[in-house]
Image (spheres, coloured by chain):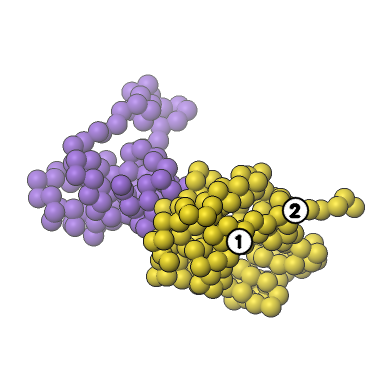
Amino acid sequence: MLLLNCPCCGIDADETELEAGGEAHITRHGAGASDDDFETYMFMRKNPKGVHFERWRHAYGCGKWFHAARCTMTLEVFGTYSAQTLEPPKALINKIKKKRPDWEGFVK
Amino acid sequence: MSNAVSAMNGASFKGSVTIKDTGLQGMITLRGDFKSAVVAKALKTATGTAMPETGQILHSAKGSAAWMSPDELLLLVDYTKVDAIIAKLDKALSGEHALVINVSDARAMFEIKGAATRDILAKGSPADMSKEGLPVGVMRRSRLGQLAVAFWMDDEKTAHMVCFRSVGEHVFMWLKNASEKGSLPKYYT
């Protein structure tokens, strides 16, 4: 079972109250973009074994989107943070680096 | 004017707890900037309450205000006064980036009363139903089975639950089923 703390309402939400929104911090390429950029935006996902940044929505709660950092292998949750950001907060990145010294860091 | 009735028209059921449709209930959705003094003042005139903190529900003699999300409140007021209160809110919020809408007939409200109330809620929702997890004065938006609901404890034995009217009958039957005698987990009682 996955528990994520929603930064919008502060509730430790069970995964059945949440909706998964896939990988976070994807750069959007829309109309007018090159085929390569659009393909990357549309189809290319990271799928790492380890640290992963994701979008989640507190669907049955406050209804807001937020970001979560967790480990795809151990399901450990490193933290959650606001959706209104283009990259994970520094403090969270440092926390993950401490726990996972081998992690290559956040790559957009 | 048509004869307005609530979702289950006042039906009630007595099992291990008493489930009751609370009848017509005025409900108003208010969206806006919670930090705005104008919004806070408008709220005060509508429900007589202050601006609720995150997750809070505040009551006064005039009505209640519940925190739904960082930009949404649910106001509970007298059913017959909804139109007048909305007119007042609209006036008070003119020029403000805010939304006020009457959702009274779009929702259903139930009262769950009995010592096993926390157990009944816990049967359908993953939320923490302990006294610490859901103290009196907190409104929790969660799910019951697969339906979105919101509930709060009025005291240790009484809870109120709000859901969409379209699923009101299902929620009522769900609660009825959950309160069949002999089916209590007795985790919280």
Secondary structure under badge 2? loop
Q: Position of residue B95 (x, y in %)?
A: 69, 63
Q: Is residue B58 left or right of residue A55?
A: right
Q: Position of residue B125 (x, y in %)?
A: 46, 52
Mark 2 lies on residue = B9
> Residue B22 or A50: which is nearer the viewer?
B22
> Residue B65 or B101: which is nearer the viewer?
B65
Q: Position of residue B150 (x, y in %)?
A: 55, 57
Secondary structure under badge 1? strand
| Sequence-first disc among 1 and 2 | 2
Question: Can residue B18 be seen from the camera position used here?
Answer: yes
Q: Are circles 1 and 2 on residues that touch, CB within 8 Å?
A: no
Q: Is residue B152 left or right of residue B108?
A: left
Q: As shown in the figure, which amino acid type bears the numbered disc 1?
A: Thr
Residue at left offset 71%, top offset 51%: B8
Question: Can residue B141 be seen from the camera position used here?
Answer: no
Pointers 1 and 2 within a single chain: yes
User: In the rendered image, what is the letter of the chain coloured purple?
Assistant: A
Q: Position of residue B160 (x, y in %)?
A: 59, 63
Using a 10 Å C-alpha cutoff, classify the residue at mark 1 as few (fewer than 14 neighbours), some (14 to 19) or many (20 or more).
some
Using a 10 Å C-alpha cutoff, classify the residue at mark 2 as few (fewer than 14 neighbours), some (14 to 19) or many (20 or more).
some
Residue at left offset 87%, top offset 50%: B2
> Residue B91 or B183: which is nearer the viewer?
B183
Residue at left offset 71%, top offset 75%: B62
Chain B appears what colour?
yellow
Q: Is residue A77 left or right of residue B59?
A: left
Mark 1 lies on residue = B18
Q: As shown in the figure, which amino acid type bears the numbered disc 2?
A: Asn
The tag on residue B129 is: none
Letter of the chain that mark 1 sits on in the rendering: B
Residue at mark 1 to residue at mark 2: CA–CA distance: 16 Å
Residue at left offset 55%, top offset 66%: B114
